[in-house]
Amino acid sequence: METTAPTTPNATKALYIIANAGFGDEIIGIARQAGIRGATIFGARGEGTHHASFLGISVDTEKEVIVCITDAESAERAMQAVSEQAGIKTSAHGVCFAMPVDKAVGISLADPEKQEN
């Protein structure tokens, strides 16, 4: 059976970053510099209080959602970096939030450079 991680409360976070489509790779680069080791990007559609329409067809904003499972310190650094470099006042229009991860199976959060062979 695979190891579950972690047992320390609030030690692991699921970091969600939502940005305009086309900025996912740039944001992952920013997050990596802040200590994030991996991420998953998936497409999404944004819908707010104001709907734009063209010829009677609703036009929704294409988004990318970047999800990272990481330690709390790296999540905090990444959120700060994304806010500064690709935040709401930039063309990426990135927003982030983190949620606690109580249990994870199939991933390792340990730093591979610190693991013993």
Image (tube, grey):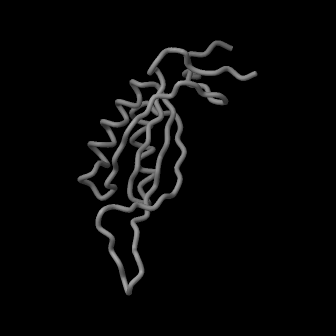
| Horizontal and vertical percent position of residue 116 | 64, 12
Which quadrant of the figure contains the C terminus? top right
**Could you tell me how many numbered marks the image carries?**
0
> In the current view of this chain or complex, which residue is farthest to the front?
49
> In the current view of this chain or complex, which residue is farthest to the right?
1
Q: Residue at x 51, y 33 (%)?
A: 69
| Horizontal and vertical percent position of residue 74 | 41, 28
Query: In this view of the protein, which residue sits in the foreground, 65 or 58?
Result: 58
| Horizontal and vertical percent position of residue 41 | 52, 49
Asked where in the image residue 6 lies, by quadrant, the reply is top right
> In the current view of this chain or complex, which residue is farthest to the top?
116
33 up-or-down from 12: above or below = below
6 up-or-down from 34: above or below = above
Q: Residue at x 44, y 42 (%)?
A: 16
Asked where in the image residue 45 lies, by quadrant, the reply is bottom left
Q: Residue at x 34, y 50 (%)?
A: 94
15 up-or-down from 103: above or below = below
| Horizontal and vertical percent position of residue 29 | 43, 43
Tell me if 77 is positioned left or right of 110 in this view.
left
117 up-or-down from 40: above or below = above
Query: In this view of the protein, which residue sits in the foreground, 59 or 109?
Result: 59
> In the current view of this chain or complex, which residue is farthest to the bottom?
55
Which quadrant of the figure contains the N terminus? top right
Asked where in the image residue 97 lies, by quadrant, the reply is top left
